[in-house]
Amino acid sequence: MEKIDKVHSPFVVLDIDNIDTDQIIPARFLKSTNKSGYGEKLFYDWRYDSKGSLKLDFPLNRNHSNVKILVAGENFGCGSSREHAAWALHDYGFRVIVSTHFADIFKNNALNNGLLPIEVSPEFYEELLEEAKVDSEISLLVDLSKEEVCLMVSGIRESFKINPHKKQCLLKGQNDLDYLIHLKDEIVAFEKSMK
């Protein structure tokens, strides 16, 4: 996994509540256990019409090159437990998802796959929506070390919480297996001490 410490990026807004994993990546595309290639299918039924042409009014289809932050409505990632949803978001290029609430399984899948899910207050979320209406290129600065997100145009900041173990994994670019391998010498020493 790549390291995440600070992410400074414009953001895309999907002001829709209860976006479920089948909307994020439709089940008909779940044909591989390889994590790549899912980004082009992200929100497929919303991004494309029945002929496979882009719907130009959908937020992700506007000119958003190098956007790493998605701001989405309440209860993001609900529905099935498919890990492919996190894979698709990551493969598309997102590194941070901001919402007022995440489904628990999605939140864990995101953290395990190099995505940082940030829960913010409804007030901060509304501020993001209002500022995005004024300027579509407005950006956020996410500082994982400080557990803080800042709306750059106004300087409004909000703290967020993250599991300390997952925070360290993201900061170091490690998954859980990398973390255990990193502790190999300590584990071996402990095992020897128990004999």
Image (spheres, rainbow, N blue to C red):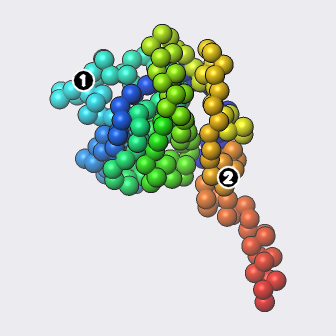
Q: Which residue shows up at 40% across the image and 42% down it?
A: 75
Q: Which mark is residue 53?
A: 1
Residue 21 rendering spot, x and y as whole percentages: 35, 45
The residue sitting at the top extreme is 134
Q: Which residue shows up at 27% across the image and 21% down it?
A: 55
Q: Which residue shows up at 53% across the image and 34% down it?
A: 121
SS category of the residue bearing label 1? loop
Q: Which mark is residue 164?
A: 2
> In this view of the protein, can residue 18 be seen by the observer?
yes
Q: Is residue 98 left or right of residue 154?
A: left
Using a 10 Å C-alpha cutoff, classify the residue at mark 2 as few (fewer than 14 neighbours), some (14 to 19) or many (20 or more): few
Foreground of the two, 122 or 103: 122
- Indicate which disc, 2 or 1, sits on the residue closer to the N terminus: 1
Q: Is residue 67 left or right of residue 173?
A: left
Foreground of the two, 73 or 115: 73
The residue sitting at the left extreme is 50
Foreground of the two, 39 or 47: 47
